[in-house]
Amino acid sequence: MLETIRQYGNVKLVASGEVLELRARHLARFRRLALDAEAGLVGPEPVPWIHHLEVELDNLRVALDWAFETNPQVALEMCVAMGNFWRSHGMGQEGVDRMRQAAELARRWRTMPSAVPEADRTVLAARVLVSNQFMVGFAGWAARETAAEEAIALARESGDPGAIIDSQTNAIQTAAMTGGGPGRDGLLAMASETLELATRFGDPMRLAIIQSSIAMLEASSDPAAAERLMELATENARRSENPWAIAGMVQMRGHVARSRHEEADAQRWYREAEGRFREIHDIRFAVSAQSEYAHSLRRSGAPAEALVEYRGTIREWQRTGNRGAVANQLESIAFVFLAQGNGGRAARLLGAAESLRETAAAPMTSSERVEYDAQVDHVRELLGSEGFAGAWAEGRRMTTDEAVALAVSDHDGGVT
């Protein structure tokens, strides 16, 4: 309806004295939708639920805003319930920002006077922090690693098996992807405990995620064990009948193949994962899989083919405001230009990426740092100290739009 009509209707509503009653009814209605959708999104047919939530998204936002003002418990329940939707819906910052807001509220709410028993508040707060732990990973793996300690501690304090399993699984998966964490022995001990809990909990989707994460940890040292674990994880994903879990296991197969330096297999799995995620309208993970495919192409000596993929993914990451991912793509495209002998363009893109990471507080992982340092040394050798410093400084002065334009352009626009 026209904005003027909406405003007129709102004035009349306020004058009627029924605002609070109607807001309460509206909140109850959309709280119920969020809680119903939570189960549907991890079931065999999540797409209709995604569409339903998309249609009602403005109503959900209004209800959630009101809940944050007036009913902390409902606000936190809705944020936890909508976590899977935010993870799957496009790739925007909304879910990350909402979960951060919820985490801040959960920390305060635990100590507020409330009719809700302390034990129940602790469980809900733990679930919020676990959801936040997962969600902030979309701003960069390092952010999820930072959030893990608090989430695991509160999950253990709550005694809630789902929160314990999910917080520890997030930590294991993060460590498997980044090479960080408490060390291999500590991770495997945590993984064994988590696997036992998930087995008792009887959730095949959680089992699949844990088994695939352990497979990542084992891939380089015991390929046969990793393959057995991936087979079990794939079977559990199929048992869950959830297409997101099935697609996720396909992508994890790509990660395991990559960690064994089997790039042709990795590319095949990543391409399949991208297609599966696009089928269920999960753009975030589809672009993630496409990005991994591009990395594999570049590592296997196909820079031109990788550049075609990167030019698509960087635009998607930029469109949705994932600045850490944009920085990663700028670095990756710089590596491609360096392989083609264009050191000046590479240095400018690397300078722009460094500035963007600082602004976004999105540091690279330790495993990314190894390749990055080697490539930076190569650029410096190619350009010489003075040429390198000038091109790098020029890149640092670029806006994100300018850097992305340089990355995707067919023209250099500067010194090589």
Image: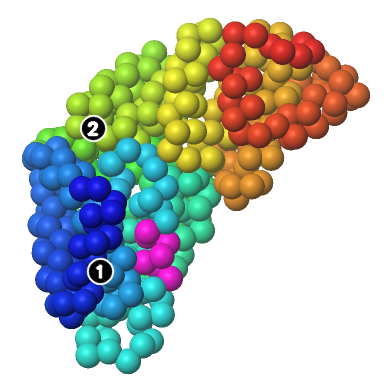
Task: Identify the residue shown where x is 85% and y is 26%.
Answer: 390
Q: Nearer the viewer, residue 352 or 202?
A: 352
Query: In front: mark 1 or mark 2?
Result: 1
Is residue 245 visible to us here? yes
Label 2 amino acid? Answer: His
Q: Judging from the image, what secondary structure is the residue with disc 2 in?
A: loop
Where does the image place residue 356, in percent across and percent down from the top left? 63, 40
User: Left or right: 199 with respect to 260?
Assistant: left
Taking the image as shown, residue 111 lies to the left or right of residue 395, namely left
Q: Residues within 10 Å of mark 2 (few under 14, many from 20)?
A: some
Name the residue tied to disc 2: 281
Asked whether, in this view, residue 122 is left or right of residue 94, the answer is left
- Characterize the local packing of mark 1: few (<14), some (14-19) or many (20 or more) Cα atoms within 10 angstroms: few
Q: In percent of the image, x 22 and y 80: which residue is there?
A: 120
* Residue at 43% from the left image edge and 71% from the top image edge: 104
Give the Cα distance between marks 1 and 2.
39 Å
Q: Which residues are magenta?
A: 98-104
Main SS of the magenta part reads helix
Q: Which mark is residue 11?
A: 1
Q: Nearer the viewer, residue 192 or 19?
A: 19
